[in-house]
Amino acid sequence: MEGRGTAAAAAGRPRPPRLLVAALSALLLLALWKLAALGVGKEIVLPSPERVAAEALSLYPTPRFLEALLATFLRGLAAFGLSVGIGALAGIFSGLSPVFEAALAPLLTVIRATPVLALILVALLWFPSGAVPVFAAFLMAFPVMATSAAEGARAADPRLLEMAGLFRVPGRQVLLRVRLPAAAPHLVAGARSALGLSWKVVVAGEVLSQPLRALGSGLQDSRVLLETPRVLAWAAATIFLCGLTEWLFGLAAKKALRHVL
């Protein structure tokens, strides 16, 4: 009884808004950053937050930055779309067919075991500089999506499938009413992981392949010139792009799951 009362009291307490907690956490990180910058005392090693903010304000409105942002966004979108589309298809076939799963397993193992840097360097020999980040990000995200899709394909309740077979339920209804609701959470989880991974690998590929327009190219150029505040300004843009797309994906995924489940 005491445990139930404690749980009820805890449930009745007002919870602090998540936005407020996130804002306080961000302020704490900025304060720690400022203290670290003061402790280091060298802008080339660690510039202060206000110095990076000033650099970002001068960089972000420039045509070069806007073109780089758009190019990186399109590369990330292409890599994400390819990994989700092909990965989901391969994963579903893998989940439904043990033979296909066994045939696909060596490829997934090789991709998982290959370092990202090695993939990018090899891709530099095969593709133009602008296509290298897309190819590398697709290969890195493909196993994640394929594995999640395979789990989703196997998630349907066997008893429901057996009952549907006994009552001769049409295959379309089985797909929409049984298989899709069971697979949807796995597909969404795989796509969310693939999205975050795609941005990281795309920018890393841009740093090495140096396309004409790319956030990664801006990072590398600023690093070569030892412009640390500008390096962090470019990095902040990549972080914002990744966070914004993941947030938008989360909103879309919630709405989609409400209709499916």
Image (cartoon, grey):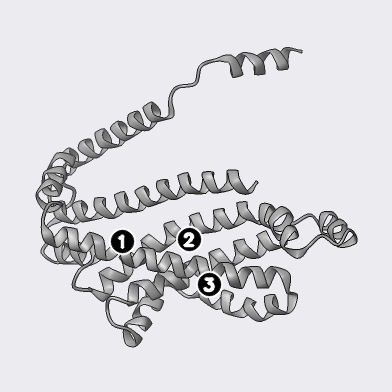
Q: Which residue is mark 1?
A: 73
Residue at 66% x, 59% y: name it: 152
- Say if residue 155 shows up in the picture: no
Q: Nearer the viewer, residue 115 or 200?
A: 200
Label 2: how many residues lie within 10 Å, few (<14), some (14-19) or many (20+)?
many
- Name which quarter of the figure residue 90 lies in: bottom right
168, above or below 107, in the image: above
Under circle 2, the secondary element is: helix
Q: Is residue 198 left or right of residue 67?
A: right
Mark with earlier residue (3, 2):
3
CA gap between label 2 and label 1 equals 15 Å
Q: Nearer the viewer, residue 259 or 2?
A: 259
Callout 2 amino acid: Ala
Residue 109 lies, in percent from the top left, at: 58, 75
Q: Which residue is mark 3?
A: 86
User: Given contact means CB atoms under 8 Å apart, are the residues at marks 3 and 2 in contact?
Assistant: no
Residue 243 lies, in percent from the top left, at: 36, 48
Q: Which residue is mark 2?
A: 194
CA gap between label 3 and label 2 equals 12 Å
Residue at 32% x, 35% y: name it: 26
